[in-house]
Image: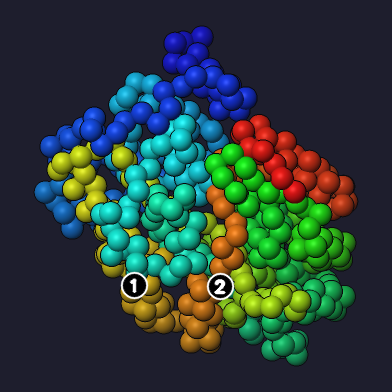
Amino acid sequence: MSRFRMAVALVTICLVAGGCKTAEGTGTAQDATDSGGRITVWVDPPRVPAVNAFQKAFPDIPVEVNTINGNVGSTELQQKFVLFNQAEKGWPDAIFFPSNDDIAWASSSKINYARDLSPDLGDILAGYPAGVIEQCKIEGQFRCLRNDAAPDVFWYDQVLLAEWGYEPPTTWEQYESLSLRIAAEHPGHITGFVGDAYAPDRYLWASGCPTNDTASEKQVRINLADERCVRVRQLLDRLLSAGVLSSTGIFSPDAAELGRRLVMSPGAVWWGNFLFRDTWKVPAGRITAAKPLRWTSDPTPMTSSEGGGLWGFSRHIKGVQLENTLTFARFVASDPRWQVDLSVGLPGYKPLQKPWLAKQREARYLADFEHAAEAFVYATTIVRPDRDYTRYNTGTVWTHTITPALTSGKSFTTAWRTFSDRLTREARSFGYTVES
């Protein structure tokens, strides 16, 4: 085994089992370094155009780009940062995290990579709706910037519902009732996906089910017996039994064919361009969006979000290198040359939402665009705040338990029990004390 592989193996054991002494949180404002100008940026492939646009806008700032994979739930990236801490060098100046949960370890006392942006980017932070930037506020500090707002709205095929004589639902109870009716009257059509890593966000988070409620860096509340979990578990169980939900995910190989038979579903704002238009090739003029579904027993309407990626920035730099990194941060968060001209998702930065919506209106893809645009903006204001990003990834646990159980023919009740047990074990393996 090579020296590097041995180091990675040791770090992996430390991350999962804990108890190993690492160079925790190394680097301070006093020992930060300055390259003199060059900045290093790590991004996944979909964010490469953002870097290209920045280089075009700021040709005098030299940028070294490192394209990283987007494997959600992998500890590979975290392992690299542990090694950087030990070497006291190697951190990127800016990074687009493959998973939003990555901000949990990147801001932890063990890694302590992500800088507090409050002192330098207060004006940018103030431009985000509270529900969009809330998950970046950790222990009172803003440790990341949201790339795009990704609240869940309610998508539906306006042409098909009108042809069948159905009204789009506005509550989860109506969603269940209409789904069961569609299953009986139009077999073969579906009203949702449950097999992808965003499914627990889409359904459990939207219901307020506590899977990721942190009290501190080492304490989390998980209680799948909570009534808010029970109601959504029972809804999913009934719809899966009726065959109107797909047990595969929105990115699965057969999703394109299934997507064209999707009548309605809760889903993120980015579903419009990325899934319906570009991936599933649903013709223009059919799909529109309404305000998020609400549970009739909830006093106020709330929704969840799916993704809406996060940018993090190094606290190990100073001088010109820091100034250039902050220029990059401002660009990816608030410059229309990226957020309006190139990004497929609704900008998290509110002043750019109108220009982005105007561009979508001109594209004439969605049916009843004004109705959808109103739903997009409204949804950004009602994202549930009581869900945190954690060092364990709930979506990964879901796809490793629920998805294979359903595709192998097991009941959702059995799959849920396995998910519940595995989620608690996973949280404990990453050092959390789990409370119910």
x, y percent for residue 108: 47, 38
Identify the residue at horizontal 34%, vertical 69% (top origin): 127
Q: How far separated are the C-alphas under marks 2 and 1?
A: 19 Å
Identify the residue at horizontal 60%, vertical 60% (top origin): 386
| In this picture, residue 362 sits left or right of residue 434 | left
Contact between labelled residues 1 and 2, with CB atoms less than 8 Å apart: no
| In this picture, residue 99 sits left or right of residue 160 | left
The mark closer to the camera, 2 or 1, is 2
Name the disc covering residue 382, or none.
Answer: 2
Number of numbered callouts drawn: 2
Identify the residue at horizontal 70%, vertical 65% (top origin): 207
| Residue type at tag 1 | Leu
Mark 1: which secondary structure? helix
Q: Which residue is at the front of the view, 230 or 353? A: 230
Q: Give the residue at mark 1.
A: 352
Mark 2: which secondary structure? loop
Asked where in the image residue 182 lies, by quadrant, the reply is: bottom right
Task: Tell me if residue 121 can be seen.
Answer: yes
x, y percent for residue 168: 69, 84
Q: Which residue is at the front of the view, 185 or 311? A: 311
Name the disc covering residue 90, or none.
Answer: none
State how the image is colored. Answer: rainbow
Task: Tell me if residue 332 can be seen.
Answer: no
Q: Is residue 64 above or below residue 150?
A: above
x, y percent for residue 116: 35, 48
Q: Which residue is at the front of the view, 420 or 46? A: 420
Asked where in the image residue 345 lies, by quadrant, the reply is: bottom left
Identify the residue at horizontal 59%, vertical 25% (top origin): 18
| In this picture, residue 399 sits left or right of residue 65 | right
| Residue type at tag 2 | Ile
| In this picture, residue 414 sits left or right of residue 349 | right
Name which of mark 2 and mark 1 comes first in the sequence. 1
